[in-house]
Amino acid sequence: MAPLEPAVRADHPAPVRQPAPVARRRAAVVRDKARDLAREGARRGGSHARAGLAYLTDRIIEIAPRVPVRDLATLRAQFPGLGPEELADKLVAGAAAGTSTVGAGIGAAAMLPVPPALPTELAAEITGVAAIELKLIAELHEVYGVRPPGNLKTRSTAYLSSWSQERGIDVMKPSTYDAALGGRMKRELRQQVMKRVVRNLPNLMPFMVGAAVGAVMNRRDTKRLAARIRADLREIQVPWEKLEELPPLEKPAEPLRLRDLPEEL
């Protein structure tokens, strides 16, 4: 029986096989090029991410002195008959409802077929939540009788430090907060902003899940932050009857408008 080998026609020359080493070299070149492109893409993406975090950090630092804060006298007049813990509960509930509203709004925007300027929307949520939480922290210090000393700018810096570290301020120990916006505080703020971005990633989920998840996560995180701050402040709390009369808080020259939020805020 004749061997089962394909016949080689005269008009079709046998294919020339490329030497394996040449093919391997070409594959290596393609692979190296792809790796270089991936590294360049990652480098550019990381650079953009760092620039975005730096912008958000500077934006939060900028708005901190503009956040309107009620002093203890104003809070007690607005919520008569409440003791320190009941008043603090009221403030936390209002702030949690406020950050929940912000999270739901951005989550709903993320669910649209073409989300409108999503990075801008996310940045708006981060700064909006930060403003609400900074206001909460400042007013909790009023309620527990431990207003940081200094002027509006100094206190705003202290509250920023408290927010970034998620700790209460011990006014008897200036080392517990930064008196100026140094490099360490800016790094901590960037880390806090990064955590907020990561926590808000579920807001990008489609199918009517984003709004609910955004609301629940923001409410939970604000309550957790408040619990940590209150635990610290209870250790250094000054009872109202022992408080020296403090001057009214200065009003920001250009108060930040916290719109569409509960009346507790």
Image: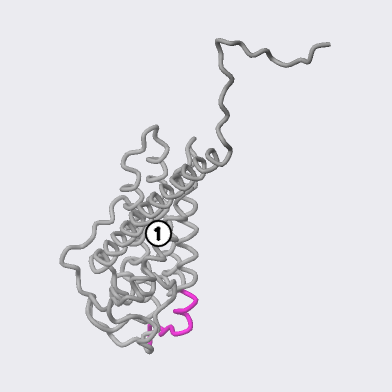
Tell which residue pokes out farthest to the right in this image. Answer: 1
Q: Position of residue 145 (x, y in %)?
A: 37, 81
Within 10 angstroms of label 1, few (less than 14), some, or many (20 or more) residues? many
- Colour mode of the rendering: one colour
Q: Position of residue 85 (x, y in %)?
A: 46, 72
- Residue where numbered disc 1 is placed: 94
Residue, x 27% and y 61% (percent of image)? Answer: 59
Q: Is residue 193 magenta?
A: no
Q: Identify the residue at the far left of this view.
A: 253
Q: Nearer the viewer, residue 2 or 165?
A: 2
Residue 211 percent coordinates (x, y): 45, 43
Residue 168 figure quarter: bottom left
Q: Residue at x 78, y 15 (%)?
A: 3
Q: Main secondary structure of the magenta part?
A: helix
Magenta region: 230-242
Q: Give residue 251's quadrant in the image.
A: bottom left
Quick one: quadrant of the N terminus?
Answer: top right
172, above or below 52, in the image = below
Dot 1: element? helix
